[in-house]
Image (cartoon, helix red, strand yellow):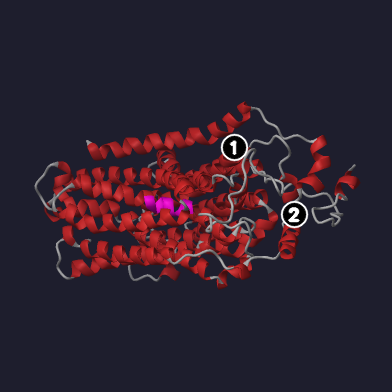
């Protein structure tokens, strides 16, 4: 039986002789008849909700900056003139928060780099193998970081979570993209929106969980971060492995019952039925236009995320708590009170960031990807332009409302772009192409914060009042969105010369271990049926839905402080 199944012909009549595929190989996860495609999104969410904790690592910075002093060693903070390289190996002084923040930067640098480097491998190896590697890297990196905390060696934390964990981030982030798009050709935006919503929601679950665990493990001589890393790594590994092993890919030629692909003309010119090889995208103008679209959208959004809390406090000052004082006139008690309100504002923004990923990506299935991004840039530009006016008028409602919508479109940009790429370049290698596009995220992660932070410092240096230092920044962000709008409007269907020929596509399918329905799935289908009960589907959604609901509840509790 093994020999006969190993010798089945592939879709091109070429013998697939050789050893049986391994447990993690792509050939082992091709879905048989009756498989319910709604089992794939919760598998993707299980991974994205775990790696999304990268957004929430800042909850560890303050405790880690006091690790040695809390232990009663008498250690002080590392000297300001100590070089970063020296601080990597310093064991006798507490790390500075600014130094710890480098881990956050490395997360997204290595996310973009690993996604770009290994996206092509992922398409051939399949989402299960990529998901397992992601789990090992992300959770193994956290365990290595726990050792670094125990030994008080920051280089181990950088290597563990920053480098190894960052590689796990990249592979985990793109692991479901191609698979979801192939399972949901009729609702590409909604499918990728569900998974990428999970990445935005990861910190919403992980941050309060980490705070609770640190409180549980903390003692008069221990901040409890090391133990928290170990517990979270074990929990995340369980969920991520469950997600990776739950991945299935559709057989070549599969499509939803009753669905027919839209014609390539009559209003669907932006949606191709052909496929571009990932090696060619660097030389295709549309790729770079979409790269700029994502860079500008993310730069504008990510620039204000990190400054949202201080921005609200400095702009409205005592008005946040009903005190007619500017920010610089507040005492310590009043500063603590407005910081609580600002924390609620940040929680509110996170909800809109997450909800926007699903809302806008799903809406793009109706509007089209190009029009959706046009809305992002036009509406976003108007909202950024309005912020100085609403701040000057003291209107908290307009100020907060503008930022909530802006952050929804920031998240929506991430969730919509995989479907945009599939429309333009086809689905065969969309995961790998998406991986290369994520270099735009790494670029934006530097560009956006630098513009906002340095403009703030520059404005303060000129003696401009704190409540006005963000005005010029908002206008600069409007300029970024105008650049993104122009790039988006220039996107046209990809020229025929860039698509793979039928022979090239057939070769790539063989390399990707795809099996044609008639030639390879036929005999297997008679012996194997993947039908699952609705109860299994419901349990899979509950497994990810309960933690997500808990995170939403904790975030709503925090957001409620803004309205008190």
Q: Read off the magenta span.
A: 409-416
**Of the pair 472 and 160, the residue shown nearer to us:** 472
- Which image quarter holds the C terminus? top left
> Can you tell which quarter of the image residue 557 is in?
top left
Q: Which residue is at 73% across, 57% downward?
A: 509
Q: Which residue is at 71% across, 41% downward?
A: 31
Question: Label 2 belongs to which residue?
Answer: 513
Q: Is residue 137 left or right of residue 126?
A: left
| Distance of label 1 from label 2 (alpha carbons) | 23 Å
**Of the pair 325 and 385, the residue shown nearer to us:** 385
Badge 1 or badge 2: first in the primary sequence: 1
Q: Position of residue 244 (x, y in %)?
A: 63, 45
Q: Which residue is at 84% across, 41% downward?
A: 523
**Of the pair 282 and 304, the residue shown nearer to us:** 282
Question: Label 1 belongs to which residue?
Answer: 38
Disc 1 element: helix
Q: Position of residue 45 (x, y in %)?
A: 54, 42
């Amino acid at each position: 039986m093994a020999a006969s199944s190993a010798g089945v012909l592939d879709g091109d009549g070429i013998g697939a002789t050789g050893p049986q595929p391994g447990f993690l190989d792509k050939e082992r996860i091709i879905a048989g008849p009756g498989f319910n495609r709604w089992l794939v999104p919760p598998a993707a969410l299980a991974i994205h909700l775990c790696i999304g904790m990268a957004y929430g690592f800042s909850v560890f910075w303050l405790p880690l900056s006091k690790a040695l002093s809390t232990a009663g060693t008498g250690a002080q903070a590392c000297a300001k003139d100590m070089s970063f390289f020296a601080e990597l190996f310093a064991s006798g002084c507490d790390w500075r928060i600014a130094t710890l923040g480098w881990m956050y930067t490395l997360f997204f640098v290595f996310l973009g780099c690993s996604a770009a480097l290994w996206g092509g491998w992922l398409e051939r190896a399949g989402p299960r193998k990529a998901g397992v590697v992601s789990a090992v890297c992300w959770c193994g990196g956290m365990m290595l970081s726990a050792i670094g905390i125990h030994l008080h060696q920051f280089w181990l934390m950088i290597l563990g979570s920053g480098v190894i964990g960052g590689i796990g981030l990249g592979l985990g982030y793109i692991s479901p993209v191609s698979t979801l798009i192939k399972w949901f050709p009729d609702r590409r935006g909604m499918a990728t929106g569900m998974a990428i919503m999970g990445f935005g929601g990861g910190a919403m679950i992980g941050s309060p969980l980490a705070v609770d665990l640190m409180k549980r493990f903390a003692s008069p001589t221990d901040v409890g971060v090391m133990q928290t890393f170990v517990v979270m790594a074990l929990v995340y590994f369980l969920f991520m492995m469950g997600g990776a092993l739950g991945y299935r890919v559709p057989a070549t030629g599969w499509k939803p019952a009753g669905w027919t692909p839209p014609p390539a003309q009559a209003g669907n010119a932006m949606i191709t039925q052909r496929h571009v090889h990932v090696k060619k995208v660097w030389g295709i103008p549309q790729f770079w236009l979409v790269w700029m679209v994502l860079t500008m959208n993310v730069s504008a959004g990510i620039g204000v995320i990190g400054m949202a809390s201080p921005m609200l406090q400095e702009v409205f000052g005592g008005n946040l708590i009903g005190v007619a004082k500017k920010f610089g006139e507040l005492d310590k008690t009043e500063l603590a009170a407005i910081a609580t309100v600002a924390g609620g504002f940040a929680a509110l923004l996170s909800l809109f960031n997450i909800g926007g990923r699903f809302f806008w990506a799903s809406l793009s299935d109706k509007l089209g990807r190009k029009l959706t991004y046009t809305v992002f840039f036009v509406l976003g530009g108007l909202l950024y332009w309005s912020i100085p006016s609403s701040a000057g008028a003291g209107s908290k409602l307009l100020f907060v409302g503008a930022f909530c919508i802006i952050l929804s479109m920031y998240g929506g940009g991430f969730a919509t772009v995989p479907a945009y790429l599939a429309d333009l370049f086809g689905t065969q290698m969309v995961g790998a192409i998406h991986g290369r596009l994520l270099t735009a995220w790494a670029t934006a992660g530097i560009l956006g914060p630098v513009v906002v932070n340095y403009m703030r410092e520059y404005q303060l240096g000129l003696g401009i009042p704190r409540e006005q230092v963000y005005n010029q920044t908002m206008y600069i962000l409007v300029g970024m969105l105008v650049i993104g709008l122009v790039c988006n409007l220039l996107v046209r269907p990809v020229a025929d010369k860039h698509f793979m020929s039928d022979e090239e596509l057939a070769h790539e399918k063989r390399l990707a271990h795809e099996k044609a329905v008639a030639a390879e799935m036929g005999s297997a289908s008679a012996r194997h049926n993947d039908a699952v009960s609705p109860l299994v589907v419901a349990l899979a959604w509950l497994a990810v839905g309960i933690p997500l609901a808990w995170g939403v509840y904790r975030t709503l509790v925090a957001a409620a402080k803004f309205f008190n």
